[in-house]
Amino acid sequence: MTPRFDELIHAPTRLSLVSLLAATDWADFRFLRDSLGMSDSALSKQLTTLEEVGYVEIRKSFIGKRPRTSVKLSPEGHEAFAGHVAALQEIVARAGLAVLPDQVH
Amino acid sequence: MEMPPIDAELALAEVRARREQVVDTNLVPTWFWPSVGGLMLLFVGAMESDVAWLMAVGTIVYTLGLGAVILAVVRKARVQVRFELLGARGIGAILGFALGLTALGVSLGFMLEALSVPFPAFLAAVPVAVGLTLGGPALMSYLRKLMLSRPLAGSR
């Protein structure tokens, strides 16, 4: 993976949001809202920003009569996140800081 | 402008913490295992009693109880962990756990029956229930460790 620092992802709230999504196949809107301690509108705004650049896919459905919104990171989002993480790891490695192990053997 | 390394390290720590949050949300809760083990014992015991009303009550309690336990776990899951985090080793561990307990219960049951021990199925189900109660949380602990040790990001 080529390191590529992504300014859009790196904004504090979005880094947390994308990190949650990167560990999931899909995530419920309420799970994201509660995990990040955000309001509905603030989370919607961040998701719209990510959707506009093609980093997330938003799916609306109904469970019975209750609406349910699910979010997933798109392949483009996964690629951008991987590049961003690689860039962060490169910065840390260059500085000679001890990075926590990040590999399965 | 180059980012200070300490900020990059903090950002990586945030990525790890959020993954941990997702993984912990997905793990089957500890109470699930003794609940399933207890229900299984109740069902097998009722079936082996050969008493009609006990068999009927046992079946109803088992069906409703298992349904309630599974529903409670499913309702808790508001997120689905990425399959790649589990990987072949995780799937292998889950299958090995399930197959191991099944093989233990079936082989012990047949052996006890061959020895004409009374209530062979119930007695064979006891170590399986104990295995579920003790092994379930241990399996979850292993899966958690495995998922958290995967690379932070990668191509799908």
Image: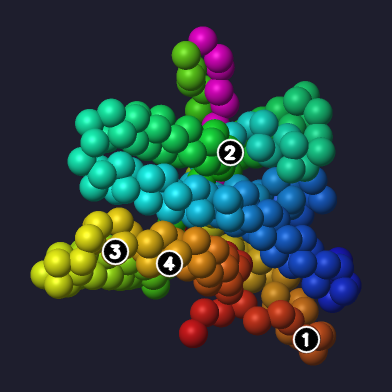
* Amino acid type, mark 4: Gly
Point out the tag, 2 or 4, that comes first from the N-terminus: 2
Q: Main secondary structure of the magenta part?
A: strand
For the point 30% across and 42% down, the residue is: B46
Which one is in front, B62 or A50? B62
In the picture as drawn, the residue positioned furthest to the bottom comes out as A96
SS of the residue under disc 4? helix
Task: Give the numbered dot on residue B131.
Answer: 4
Of tags 2 and 4, the one toward the viewer is 4
User: Would residue A65 be found to the left or right of residue B108 on screen?
Assistant: right
Which one is in front, B73 or B131? B131
For the point 51% across and 67% down, the residue is: B134
SS of the residue under disc 3? helix
Q: Position of residue B107 (x, y in %)?
A: 19, 70
The image quadrant that residue B91 belongs to is bottom left
Of tags 3 and 1, the one toward the viewer is 3
Residue under label 2: B76
Tag 3 and tag 2, C-beta contact below 8 Å: no
User: Would residue B73 be found to the left or right of residue B59 on screen?
Assistant: right
Of tags 4 and 3, the one toward the viewer is 3
For the point 58% across and 55% down, the residue is: B30
* Amino acid type, mark 2: Lys
| The N terminus of chain B - image quarter | bottom right
Give the magenta-colored segment's residue range.
Answer: A65-73
Residue under label 1: A98
Identify the subunit bearing mark 3.
B
Residue under label 3: B124
Distance CA(mark 2)–CA(mark 4): 24 Å
Q: Residues within 10 Å of mark 4 (few under 14, many from 20)?
A: some
Identify the subunit bearing mark 4.
B
Distance CA(mark 2)–CA(mark 1): 36 Å
